[in-house]
Image (tube, rainbow, N blue to C red):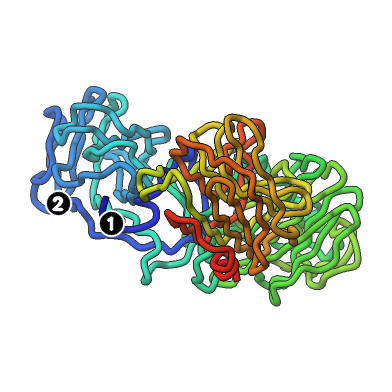
């Protein structure tokens, strides 16, 4: 059948996620595809659908009292499904920037502003605007009027660039990937961690990036200054919280509760002090050292804490395994670590401050990636990644799979790193975990034909190398270089059409038992490797 070639792993993978999803990614941009986005002398390169769009003093102008849906469409800015684009433009009006005056940004299948609507979103005319689009079909970008207004509206300096992921010259930043865009994540050094696969989660904190909102209250006395530092996403959106009085109790808090067993996270960076305290009224607390990137003391009601380095001095601070309902979550700048609850310990000096961005409160036994919110809770859908077996020459009789991955799930929760399947739980060859072991299994017509333990399950976030080989009456699995464990009484299921990455098609478990971590590599061989070869692959 010949060799199939793909430009990248994401070209091979069929991927879906019915929401955005953030990851620390390498981001760069392609060339601007817009011709005459600055409208220096005319509207060439653009199609006017309606006489109300005209050229005016170096800008595209939509005249006063224009009826709705009069569009200006670029004849060059052709965007493609499955890719992400950055759209930037300047917008203004003849009477300044009236409140609630919007322009639609659309993608349509024709370059004359007609045809199938692919994307449609209102944006308030507030000057410079930057948006990111992940279209579900190919089309052309256009600007459309929302409603008739008694003033002129202007568009200028339009650019549309493809977002390029994983380029060697890319900038490391927390990037919110659009719907159905997979996330290849990196660490702060630029080393690739792999394809991020997570279950669905909801961020309860309603203003995750804006601590100036009334949602965040000042405990005792704290001054919050918005948009004063470059955040982990590369934008000037991080806030400073600073003690206003020399007292033991300073910080920003919300009345939203952390559910029992839940998680609290925030990105933090040292300013005038190096310590950040998490706390709740009632003795549940944890400390984080923003100078040295280590966690400090925590109460017995907090199961775990972690601090993870991000570029430019930022740290992701997390606390989870909280054994009580955590009420009134407090983020408190501290000059020293303190010996207890940051609500009532360690006296601040006036001006003691840290930078904050990206707060998250979520239910769950472990923290997940950041979910942005802007006034309401937000949910990230599950990542679903699979490769059709037709894409890599699947052998129906025998084969081998080797995978390298990390999962942050605790041992009380099961997951799978991969699953060959017909798309149902009834015919599968899978990796999965029990509370104590990494296992391999074959399910044939709904019957568990073989289930072998390959070795002990380690701590969350350990690097795991696992390989299996299979054919009728010959099933073997090796874990982290150990001697392969075998079974000689198995019938390999037929009709397997999909290889799932980071889950194993278990319809009886929520989220298909997602790995909640990174698939760093996966290899398929259309033959059964020897037990020695399986062992060598996992060493």
Write the residue at 82% across / 54% down: 279
All told, the count of numbered labels is: 2
Q: Residue 331 carries which label?
A: none
Can see residue 244? no
In the depicted view, which residue is nearer to us: 67 or 496? Answer: 496
Q: Which of 524 and 192 is in front in this view?
A: 524
Q: Is residue 170 left or right of residue 35?
A: right
Residue 514 in the image: state x and y as whole percent.
Answer: 61, 44
Q: Identify which residue is drawn at 66% across, 70% down.
A: 270
As measured in the structure, the alpha-carbon distance from the residue carrying label 1 to the one carrying label 2 is 39 Å
Q: What percent of the width, then of the height, locates residue 458?
A: 74, 61
Residue furthest bottom as drawn: 292
Secondary structure under tag 2 reads loop
Quarter in which the C terminus is drawn = bottom right
User: Does dot 1 land on a helix, a strand or a loop?
Assistant: loop
Q: Quadrant of residue 428?
A: top right
The residue singled out by tag 1 in the image is 3
Residue 53 position in % (x across, y down): 16, 34
For disc 1, the neighbor class at 10 Å (few under 14, some 14 to 19, many from 20) is: few
Quadrant of residue 408 in the image? bottom right
Lower sequence index among marks 1 and 2 = 1
Which residue carries the number 2 mark?
A: 35
Can you tell which of label 1 and label 2 is closer to the viewer? 1
Q: Residue at x 86, y 62 (%)?
A: 248
Q: Residues within 10 Å of mark 2 (few under 14, many from 20)?
A: some
Q: Between residues 338 and 292, which one lies in front from this camera angle? A: 292
Compared across the picture, whether 124 is left or right of 296 comes to left
* Relative side of 455 to 379, left or right: right
Res. 299 visible in picture: yes
Q: Is residue 96 above or below residue 533?
A: above
Quick check: marks 1 and 2 in contact, CB under 8 Å? no
520 or 394: nearer the viewer: 394
């Amino acid at each position: 059948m010949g060799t199939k070639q793909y430009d990248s792993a994401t070209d091979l993978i069929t991927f879906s996620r019915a929401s955005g999803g953030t990851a620390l990614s390498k981001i760069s941009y392609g060339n601007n595809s817009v011709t005459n986005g600055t409208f220096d002398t005319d509207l060439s390169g653009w199609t006017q659908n309606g006489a109300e769009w005209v050229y005016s003093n170096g800008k595209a102008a939509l005249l006063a009292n224009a009826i709705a849906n009069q569009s200006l469409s670029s004849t060059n800015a052709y965007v493609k499904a499955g890719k992400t684009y950055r759209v930037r433009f300047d917008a203004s009006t003849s009477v300044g920037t009236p409140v609630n005056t919007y322009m639609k940004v659309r993608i349509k299948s024709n370059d004359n502003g007609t045809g199938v609507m692919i994307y449609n979103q209102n944006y308030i005319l507030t000057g410079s605007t930057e948006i990111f689009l992940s279209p579900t079909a190919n089309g052309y970008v256009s600007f459309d009027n929302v409603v008739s207004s008694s003033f002129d509206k202007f568009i200028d300096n339009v650019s549309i660039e493809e977002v390029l992921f994983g380029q060697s010259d890319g900038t490391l930043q927390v990037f919110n990937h659009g719907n159905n865009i997979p996330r290849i994540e990196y660490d702060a050094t630029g080393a690739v961690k792999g394809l991020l696969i997570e279950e669905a989660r909801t961020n309860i904190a309603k203003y995750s990036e804006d601590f100036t909102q009334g949602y965040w209250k000042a405990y005792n006395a704290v001054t919050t200054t918005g948009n004063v530092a470059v955040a982990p996403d590369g934008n000037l959106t991080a806030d400073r919280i600073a003690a206003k009085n020399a007292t033991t109790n300073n910080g920003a808090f919300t009345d939203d509760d952390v559910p029992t067993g839940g998680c609290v996270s925030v990105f933090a960076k040292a300013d005038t002090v190096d310590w950040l305290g998490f706390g709740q009224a009632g003795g549940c607390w944890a400390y984080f050292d923003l100078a040295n990137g280590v966690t400090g003391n925590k109460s017995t009601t907090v199961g775990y804490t972690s601090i993870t380095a991000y570029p430019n001095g930022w740290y992701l601070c997390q606390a989870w395994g909280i054994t009580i309902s955590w009420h009134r979550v407090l983020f408190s700048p501290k000059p020293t670590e303190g010996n207890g609850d940051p609500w009532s310990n360690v006296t601040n000096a006036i001006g003691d401050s840290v930078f904050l961005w990206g707060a998250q409160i979520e239910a769950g036994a472990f923290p997940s990636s950041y979910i942005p919110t802007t006034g309401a809770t937000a949910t990230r859908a599950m990542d679903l990644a699979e490769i059709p077996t037709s894409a890599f020459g699947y052998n129906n009789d025998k084969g081998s799979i080797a995978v390298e991955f990390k999962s942050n799930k605790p041992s009380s929760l099961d997951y799978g790193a991969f699953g060959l399947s017909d798309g149902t739980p009834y015919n599968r060859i899978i990796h999965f975990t029990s509370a104590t072991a990494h296992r391999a299994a074959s399910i044939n017509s709904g019957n568990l034909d073989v289930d072998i333990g390959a070795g002990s399950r380690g701590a969350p976030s350990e690097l795991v190398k696992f390989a299996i080989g299979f054919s009728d009456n010959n099933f073997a699995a090796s874990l982290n270089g150990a001697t392969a464990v075998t079974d000689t009484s198995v019938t390999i299921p037929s009709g397997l059409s999909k290889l799932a990455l980071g889950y194993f098609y278990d319809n009886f478990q929520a989220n298909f038992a997602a790995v909640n971590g990174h698939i760093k590599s996966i290899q398929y061989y259309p033959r059964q490797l020897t037990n020695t070869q399986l062992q060598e692959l996992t060493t």
